[in-house]
Amino acid sequence: MVETPNDAPPPQGSDMDRDALAASPFGQVPIEISITIGHAHPLVSELMALQEDSVLPLDRRIGDPVDLTIGGRLIARGILKEMDSETDTQLAVCLTEVVELKAGQ
């Protein structure tokens, strides 16, 4: 039998894959995503001299993308945004790039 486009399996990452995952027990497992806004590289002597109100420069500038990682693995990049709620202003990330993960990575 020849597969027609209607019979073809959905591409990975499709709505059907996401719906199936959301319905499975694994879809309800929380994960932690780390957002890295930059790194600092002080000397040990500079680190020892830090005190309240010290400024530690990072290797990124305002407006540079931030990295989103899970388990130390890069999954996406984005930019920081402010998100207003009824009671507070919250920091959020707007995704600008999603890294294509390959099976077995």
Image (cartoon, rainbow, N blue to C red):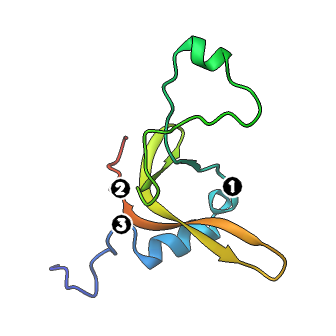
Depth check, front residue: 20 or 76: 76
In the rendered image, the quadrant that contains the N terminus is bottom left
| First of labels 1, 2 by sequence position | 1
Q: CA distance from mark 1 to mark 3?
A: 20 Å
Q: Position of residue 16 (x, y in %)?
A: 46, 77
Residue drawn at the location 32% of the way across and 49% of the way down: 102
**64 or 23, nearer to the observer:** 64
**Which residue is outermost to the left?**
2
Q: Earlier in the sequence, mark 2 or mark 3?
A: 3
Residue 43 percent coordinates (x, y): 52, 16
User: Residue at image x 71%, y 68%?
Assistant: 90
Q: Quadrant of residue 91?
A: bottom right
Question: What is the distance, in whole Å, between disc 1 and disc 2 at their CAs?
Answer: 21 Å
* Residue for badge 2: 99
**Quarter that holds the C terminus:** top left
Q: Secondary structure at mark 2?
A: loop
- Of circles 1 and 2, which is in front? 2
Q: Earlier in the sequence, mark 1 or mark 3?
A: 3
Give the number of the disc on residue 29: 1
Between 9 and 55, the residue placed more toward the observer is 55
Q: Amino acid at mark 1?
A: Val
Mark 3 Cα shell of 10 Å, populated few (<14), some (14-19), many (≥20) = few
Q: Name which residue lies at 73% across and 72% down.
A: 89
Q: Which residue is mark 3?
A: 12
